[in-house]
Amino acid sequence: MFWDEVYKGKPPWDLDHPQPAFQALIQNGEIKPGRALDIGCGRGENAILLAMSGCEVTGIDLAENAISDAKVKAKERNVKVKFVVEDALQMDWLFEEGEFDIVIDSGLFHVMTDEERPVFAQQVHRVLRKGGKYFMLCFSDKEPGEYDLPRRLSKAEIESTFSPLFEIIYIKDAVFDSLLNPSNRKAYLLSGVRK
């Protein structure tokens, strides 16, 4: 499978630290302790950060290699996180409706096709409790590049996908930290509340 192959090496987003945007959300109190889901968690840095900040965390990813590594990392750091191999577009059978207070997505939404986006938004909406918070970090259309992936998204695309199901608090300029160009990749950070 594609994502397992990617994780046999060290993909550019696979940092040995959490994304600074999520660290800031915790520091400024936007993310508070609660039941949290990290969708597309990769090797688990953001999920581990949430757990260390008092959240009860589940991390899911399609890549078995990444989940195996995340489990080892959490154990080494003595942090409790439940890591599961699962497709973010098919979470119905895995989680109850309204199971989570917080859902985060660091770099998953921007690899989805136009057809997958509304399905993904529905899935996130379903697993969040009413009033639960969704935070998403993706490459913005201000980030230069010749490649199709990850897609560069406009504020309008993000808004049209999520506004039917979420009250959008903000979509603001942020940085997506990467091994290729650390602390310098242009991104958007979405904060939304489940309607």
Image: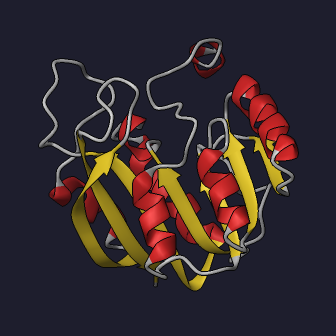
Total labels: the figure holds 0
The front one of 8 and 79 is 79
- Expressed as whole percent of the image width and height from the top left, the position of residue 35 reads 72, 74
Residue at image position (29%, 28%) is: 181
Question: Which residue ends up furthest to the front in the rendered image?
Answer: 77
Regarding residue 165, the answer to whether it shows in the image is: no
Relative placement, left or right, of 15 versus 59 is left
Query: How far across and down, in percent of the image, does residue 97 sit?
Result: 71, 73
- In screen coordinates, is 71 left or right of 172? right
Seen in the picture, residue 133 relative to 36 is either above or below; the reply is: below
At x 70%, y 46%, the residue is 60
Q: Which is more toward the observer, 192 or 16?
A: 16
Question: Which corner quadrant of the image does residue 156 belong to?
Answer: bottom left
Is residue 57 something one can see in this rendering? yes
Q: Quadrant of the N terminus?
A: top right
**Where in the figure is residue 48, as x and y percent of width and height?**
69, 54
**Identity of the residue drawn at 62% across and 46% down:** 45
Q: Position of residue 155 (x, y in %)?
A: 18, 58
Q: Is 119 situated left or right of 81 in this image?
A: left
Q: How is the image coloured?
A: secondary structure
Above or below, 113 relative to 92: above
Which of the 4 image quarters holds residue 149? top left
Q: Is residue 62 left or right of residue 185?
A: right
Q: Quadrant of residue 21?
A: bottom left
Instruction: Answer above or below: position of 163 versus 13.
Output: below
Residue drawn at (48%, 62%) of the image: 23
